[in-house]
């Protein structure tokens, strides 16, 4: 569809802005152009569109050199949407969109046809500006104006759409509306889009492929995960970043890292965990990085309040998540900053222990009820049931954990819990085998993200040894406490 071969160009012959870019853009794709200010993003778009003449190299559209097209022929192939500026527009929405049909007229709208009329109406309908048809463009919002110009570009019925920062100055609602609409044209009608972006995350979210420029040269071209690599982005933008995955779609996103994000030390001690009437509570001055299977705010996040709530054996609720959120609010805490677990074990039975080795320390909290103890390998023998009993485990680490060490910490803690269950001979009463846990166990690993970095937390690492020992010993104590309370001690 679009092919660039050793393209050089700019504003001064002896100082080209774009230097030797070669790439092929297939039909029916959305392509994003990224790079720091002054790297040549808009210049590249102008060279592709023919607004700026090439100094050398070639641009081909549908295997035909750009320079061989007449202006009208090129407008039938390519539509250009420049940056939206804050000046006034004297046309109505309909008049503005109708200008997109000019390349298809033999004179100045002297051959307006039923097809032209239908295309204009369809373009306004697609972009959601049909209701503003007779309103002056100058009285519309920035987002509505931008959608109007997109409608004008669509009305050209060109196969290639060039955009220069289409979401600039738009709020997130209008950004999403505009990008959703453009993406729909790409996926349903085979439109090819090449767009300049400043927002890497927006580009990664909507684009099939990305172009990364630096000083007018091509650094990378490919799918978002190939282009937005940590070291590559940091080198081009001279900025520390941290790549993450979008929570809902398989696209990378970029988080900026402030220069002073690690200041001071924020150690958590066992003495900071309080046992109240109906819950165990930890509050920290600084949020901890957490991964958990808690009832409230499960998953990965940053939190400063941790609750292990005890409820009665007769607790019944159709929506435990909403009820827990209401409980957190009533207790005076902030639900978005709170991780909360639930158990039938009274708060007073919580086991809290500290462990330290060579500059790394952890705090472990365990409550254990095993009325519904289950052997995970035999759980298929069971039907759903409502027996109470839960093992809840907290592991608070005073160190910096990587994603890898968070995952390994969860594995090590789980293995230690299973070993404690085996040594205490906790049985699955259905399978008549040693249980591995309960059907409602919760685990939390939290890190202060201050202190010594811990790359790994497997069973034989320094951190893994602490977690394995701590979870095992605290779980043994909690299980024995449960047995005593139930009169099950031998």
Image (tube, helix red, strand yellow):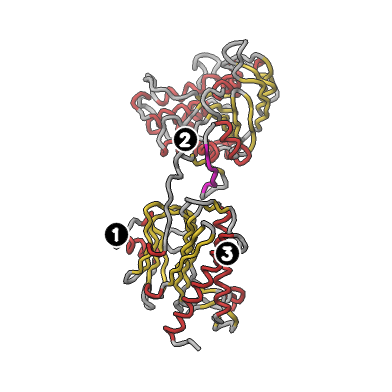
The residue stretch that appears in magenta: 240-246
Residue 228 point in image, percent of width and height: 58, 38
Query: Which of the two discs, 1 and 2, labels the residue nearer the N terminus?
Result: 2
Q: Secondary structure at mark 3?
A: helix
Residue 331 point in image, percent of width and height: 30, 62
Q: Nearer the viewer, residue 228 or 66?
A: 228
In the rendered image, the residue lying farthest to the top is 13
Q: Residue at horizontal 48%, vertical 31%?
A: 123
Query: Which of the two discs, 1 and 3, labels the residue nearer the N terminus?
Result: 1
Q: Secondary structure at mark 1?
A: loop
Q: Residue at horizontal 49%, vertical 17%?
A: 109
1 or 2: mark nearer the eye: 1
Find residue 96 and report its image quarter: top left
Instruction: Give the left or right position of residue 380, taking residue 339 as reference.
Output: right
Question: What residue does disc 1 label?
Answer: 332
The mark found on residue 465 in the picture is: 3
The mark found on residue 178 in the picture is: 2
Q: Is residue 266 visible?
A: yes
Q: Is residue 76 visible?
A: no
2 or 3: mark nearer the eye: 3
Per the model, the C-alpha gap separating discs 2 and 3 is 53 Å
Per the model, the C-alpha gap separating discs 1 and 3 is 37 Å
Residue 405 point in image, percent of width and height: 57, 56
Tell me whether circle 1 and circle 2 mark residues in contact (CB < 8 Å). Answer: no
1 or 3: mark nearer the eye: 3
Residue 350 point in image, percent of width and height: 41, 72
Per the model, the C-alpha gap separating discs 1 and 2 is 41 Å
Q: Nearer the viewer, residue 269 or 359?
A: 359
């Amino acid at each position: 569809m679009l092919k660039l071969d050793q393209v050089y160009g700019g504003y001064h012959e002896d100082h080209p802005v774009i230097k030797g870019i070669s790439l092929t853009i297939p039909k029916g794709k959305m392509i994003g152009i990224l790079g720091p200010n002054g790297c040549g993003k808009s210049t590249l778009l102008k060279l592709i569109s023919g607004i700026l003449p090439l100094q050398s190299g070639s641009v081909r559209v549908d295997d035909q050199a750009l320079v061989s097209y007449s202006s009208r022929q090129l407008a039938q192939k390519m539509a250009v949407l420049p940056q939206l500026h804050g000046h006034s527009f004297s046309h109505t929405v309909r008049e503005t969109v109708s200008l997109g049909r000019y390349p298809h007229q033999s004179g100045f709208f002297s051959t307006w046809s039923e097809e032209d009329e239908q295309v204009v109406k369809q373009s306004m309908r697609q972009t959601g500006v049909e209701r503003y048809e007779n309103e002056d463009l100058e009285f519309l919002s920035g987002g509505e104006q931008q959608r109007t110009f997109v409608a004008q570009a669509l009305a050209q019925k060109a196969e290639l759409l060039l955009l220069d920062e289409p979401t600039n100055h738009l709020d997130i609602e209008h950004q999403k509306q505009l990008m959703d609409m453009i993406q729909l044209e790409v996926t349903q009608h085979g439109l090819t889009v090449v767009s300049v972006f400043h927002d890497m995350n927006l580009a990664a979210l909507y684009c099939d492929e990305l172009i990364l420029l630096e000083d007018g040269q091509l650094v990378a071209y490919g799918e978002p995960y190939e282009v937005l690599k940590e070291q590559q982005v940091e080198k081009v933008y001279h900025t520390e970043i941290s790549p993450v995955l979008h929570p809902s779609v398989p696209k990378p996103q970029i988080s900026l890292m402030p220069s002073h994000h690690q200041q001071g030390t924020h150690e958590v001690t066992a003495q900071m965990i309080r046992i109240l009437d109906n819950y165990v509570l930890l509050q920290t001055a600084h949020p901890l990085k957490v991964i958990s299977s808690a009832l409230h705010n499960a998953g990965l996040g940053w939190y400063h309040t941790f609750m292990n709530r005890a409820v009665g054996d007769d607790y019944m609720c159709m929506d435990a998540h909403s009820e827990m959120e209401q409980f957190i609010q009533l207790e005076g805490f902030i639900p978005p900053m709170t991780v909360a677990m639930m158990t039938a074990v009274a708060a007073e039975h919580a086991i809290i222990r500290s462990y330290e080795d060579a500059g790394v320390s952890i705090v472990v909290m365990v409550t254990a009820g095993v009325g519904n103890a289950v052997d995970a390998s035999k759980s298929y023998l069971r039907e759903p049931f409502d027996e109470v009993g839960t093992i809840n485990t907290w592991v608070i680490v005073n160190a910096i954990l990587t994603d890898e060490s968070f995952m390994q910490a969860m594995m090590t803690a789980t293995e230690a819990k299973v070993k404690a269950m085996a040594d205490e001979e906790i049985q699955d009463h259905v399978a008549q085998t040693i249980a591995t846990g309960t059907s409602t166990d919760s685990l939390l690993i939290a890190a202060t993200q201050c202190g010594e970095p811990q790359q790994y937390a497997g069973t034989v690492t320094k951190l893994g040894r602490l977690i394995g020992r701590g979870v095992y010993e605290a779980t043994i104590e909690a299980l024995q406490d449960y047995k005593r309370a139930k009169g099950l001690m031998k």
